[in-house]
Amino acid sequence: MRRSPVVVAVLSAALGISSARAVETNARSWNDCLKAPDRSCVLNEAIDQVYLMDRTDRRAALVGSVAQTFAKAGEIDKATQLALQLPDGLLVRITVLREIAAAQARAAHQTEAQATFDTALQLAYGWKDALERGEILHAIAIAQADAGMKAAADVSFDQARQAAEAVRIVAEKNRIVIPSPESKLARLLRSLAMHAAEQGDTTQALQIARAIRYDAATRVGTLLALADVQMRAGISPEAVLDDALVAARDPGSNMAQWPSMRDSGIKMKGSSANVRLLCDVGRAQARAGLKGDARATFDEALQTIVGALSLAPSATALPTASANALADIADAQREAGLKDTAHETLYRAAMAADATTPDSLRAIALARVAEVRSKAADAAPDNFARALAVARALDDRNGAWARQTIASSEASAGLRDAAAGTFAEAVGLAHDNGRMLREIAGAQWRAGFVREAAATFEQAMATTMADERRTPLDVGELIRRIAYNDRGSELLAVASPTLRVRLLEAADTVTEPLARAELLSAIARVLSN
């Protein structure tokens, strides 16, 4: 699929397309790149896919992605040349300019960096969508702060806050946007609140946090983080914790009631389950020395679970109780120092786990109870052994899924050797299932088994590529699991060189040029040069 650099240069010139790549005639060939891939040769191949195509928004997004990768790698000239291809009316141009300015600052080119930041800001100030404008300005402010431009960053942070305050969420008929505008706004406000707190303005931080609507999880999390700030400063956080408790109870946190969902015309099931939020509030109350409030909050969490308060759980009540939710409460009570209460809740969780159906879910519930018991040094029977016994009686597909989850619980409980063995069992059962292998690899990675995850990803790649039933979605999802992860470079650093090659070979099977270029650009982000 690779074109001659000379041909690219000639055709690009004929079409009036300016590019860094078009004149780079001494670049490595694609065949050489496949044998020993690095960031530059992969980005060059990605750009080769788009030079001769129409200037669509999708193409611009790809060019912008490549430009950002070049900028982050310190290749400012290449990033700047690509930025010239991006019209002012696209959001990606502002993002690229921000990355170029940050790179210029890292290279000690302060005058150029300031000028580039100013160009990005002028475009951002004119952006009509208030939410997108707030996100852009916030990102620029962070980059300015990182570059040591505090005064300019403070102005940008304030402009971002004003934009966030101007956001009005309106649904589009028969259309739902993911991530939702409510969640995006909540994350922006959380970041702005924490910035205000870092600057010592707790009053403004609380005002911003209390402005978070709909997304109860983000509002509660922000208020709890600010409560911790107050505790470190010697200020009582009781009032803020009361606000967090009210937010955790908010029935409006049900996503089905959010404006972008409710008014879209699309029916959607929602859940207002708030057990974990209540647990988080209870933990924070205990940290603040409010043990009585913590007990009451945990009791409220228990009351949300049908059948959980039966002193001796009955056979009819148990199936309606959630073993995982009860285990979460017991874990929170343990962390809060309420040992006896935690033991009682954990007993109920174990009984609920025993009553869980089907067996695949019962194995997972038993493992979660075992995890909490291990953390609590509870001398009760070994639920991990029972969970594995149930999992080993399942078919290969369900058995692999159950073992993967049990292994994650074992790792969380600190039983690393046991977790490694259980993960290995899961991999063995899923040896011919590329999709299942990629899920197991992801679980290993999250559990801290980085080398094992790299090996499983490589096996998943080989299995997927050998499967005649694979789809472009399978290939793309597998590549993205690594390339879109912030720790992707870490994984490839410990992986065998074969995994890098396998990633590129998989992308090479995608026939649509822009889709192939998008995957190559993603892979380049996690490659070293």
Image (cartoon, rainbow, N blue to C red):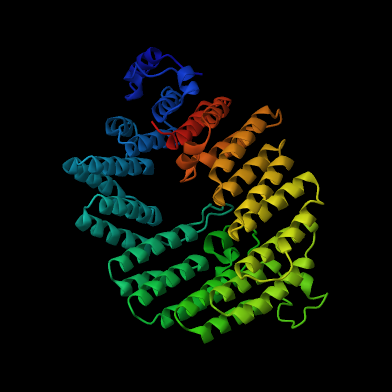
Image coords of residue 410 (percent x, y): 64, 57
Above or below 524: residue 206:
below
Above or below 290: residue 418:
above
Which of the pair 321/517 is nearer the observer? Answer: 321
Residue sitting at x 47%, y 68%: 221
Residue sitting at x 49%, y 17%: 31
Confirm whether residue 250 shows in the render.
no
Residue at the far bottom in the pictured view = 292
Image coords of residue 341 (percent x, y): 63, 81
Image coords of residue 451 (percent x, y): 55, 41
Residue sitting at x 40%, y 13%: 7
Which quarter of the rendering shows the C terminus?
top left
Name the side, left or right, on which 437 lies relative to 194: right
Which of the pair 140/35 is nearer the observer? Answer: 35
Residue sitting at x 39%, y 34%: 66
Task: Examine the image and state in which quarter residue 186 appears.
Answer: bottom left
Confirm whether residue 351 shows in the render.
yes
Name the side, left or right, on which 385 lies relative to 231: right
